[in-house]
Amino acid sequence: MKRVLVAILLIVFVISIAWVLQVQHQNQTRVLTISTTTSLYDTGLLEEAIAPAFKEKYGIELHFIPKGTGAAIQDAKNGASDAIMVHARSKEVKFMEEGYGVNRKIFAYNFFVIVGPPEDPAEIKGLSPVEALKKIAEAGRSGKAIWVSRDDGSGTNTKEKALWKMAGFDYAEIKEENWFRRTGTGMGATLNYANNVGGYTLSDTGTYLKFRKDGLISLEALVDKGEELINIYAIIIVNPEKFQKDFEGAILLAKWLTSREGQKIIGQFGVDQYDKPLFFPIVSVLEKKEEPIYDWILRYGLIEDGDKLTECPQRYRYQSSLTFFEVNQT
Amino acid sequence: MTWEYVLKGIEGAFEMIASLDVEVADIALRSIKVSGIATLMAAIIGIPTGVALGISTFRGRNVLRSFFNGMLGTPTVVMGLILYLILAPAGPLGSLKLLYTEMGISFGQMLLILPIVVSFTASSIESVEREIRELALTLGASRAEATLKVIREASAGVLLAVIAAFNRAIAELGIALMVGGNIFVRGGALNTRVLTTSIQMYVARGDIDIAIALGMILLGIVFVITTVSNFLQSRWVLK
């Protein structure tokens, strides 16, 4: 009986030590929890490039929780994160409208690609994105092509829905058709699936390049030009009036991401591995008004605020040392 | 093509183990630590409960027994989701600050494996209860002594319950992912990446060979622990 008692005491002791240590670490380390999208995370940009550099500079640990854009926003609404890094403007605006997010800053862009089998049964190579989707739908209905959709509420999926709408299709209707396959998972799994069934899909450049280079898929980038395909990443900070989070720390991160140093790290990531950057810095484009990207960013990355276009409308700004890009609408 | 992956993965696993890759060792140790704590917690709560359920004959005992039996098959994702909602800062237990922490995973896994400890313990007590008790009483033992004897006889079964519970905890993904968040910062003190979540992540990233290597390490841990416990058990029974 005595031995059992000693064992129990020992176990309780071990557990409490572990708990105390964790609480101590929690109090000692300044941590920012960032809910983010899988396309940023799975390339390694966040954990391998941004987190170490930010920690070295400010001593703040960045904890990234990768989810789809929709789920990342939900995470922030549950009070789990200090900021979100996402890529779906319509959802971002809603997030701020509901009062959860403030101080939106755009920090990077790249392009989506429509990828498909090398034989290209729907003959979309080189077309504009909208024309390509029309062709795919046509070929799909006559049984010659398959479209693979993530259908998971992610930023990529949001873009896909917008593209179908531009092509004159109702996403809710066509997704029930038999040439339209829905995976409901992340980008990597969706690319694998599309590769297996010889289908077309919309992908972010980063994940596609990585899978392609590692020889996991033989899909080809068939449509990669067109302003509709621009993919703009933004950071939004959780409203300090909603949750007691590390607002100041999150402001530091937003500021650093758009600083010269942060932008350089973003632009250089992946160059040694893929011979081209996976993400492009956005600040210099805005400063130098580099056409045509500048124009596309105005159209797809900014938000209307009265007679101005801005990355964060006045009513969603919360007092901080951040400045926001704005330009008069023409 | 496929076999190349597997072979590369196996090769990679041995390389990682041989070279004592710091990151891999860190992740594997965290898996053992997190699930070990979960198992210890489940043991101090579950074994007494199981023993009580096995020995006593109160009303409602059967209801409780079927409750724990039913909970044996709880899907880990459902458990993960419920815990996420409860532990999120906006949830009822948000103030504990357990979301996205190691202790959070341990707490969740403890709830997951508690039914295993309780049910298996109760079963092993029941299987020896009548025979041993009657024998002990016939040989002149008091009631309390007879009960102690029953527990001692069932101890091999209890050990098996604890091992089975640990194996389920270390192999589950749903809770570790939703409550833990797969956080990893080089040199960070608050990481939550464990073997199962890192396997899932590397598969999503297309790094299949690393995923296979980590999978083999996980299998290795489960195998070693089961073997050691079998050995302990056989010695125990022989005594």
Image (tube, coloured by chain):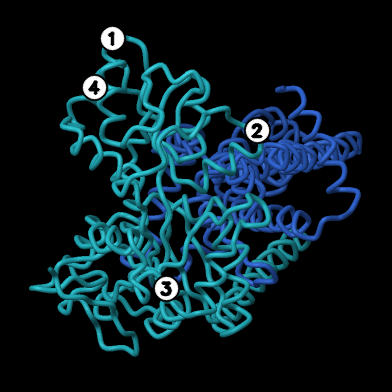
**Residue A205 spot, x, y in % from top left:** 48, 46
Q: Which of the two labelled residues, at mark 4 and mark 3, occupies the earlier sequence position?
A: 4
Q: Which of the two labelled residues, at mark 2 and mark 4, occupies the earlier sequence position?
A: 4
On the same chain, marks 4 and 3? The answer is: yes
Q: Amino acid at mark 2?
A: Gly
**Residue A166 spot, x, y in % from top left:** 19, 38
Mark 3 Cα shell of 10 Å, populated few (<14), some (14-19), many (≥20)? some
At x 9% / y 73%, what residue is drawn?
A307
**Chain assigned blue:** B
**Residue A272 spot, x, y in % from top left:** 68, 56
Residue A1 in view? yes
Residue position for label 2:
A215
Question: Mark on residue A142?
Answer: 1
Q: Chain of mark 2?
A: A
Q: Amino acid at mark 4?
A: Glu
Name the colour assigned to chain A in the rendering: cyan
Q: CA distance from mark 1 to mark 3?
A: 46 Å
Residue position for label 4:
A176
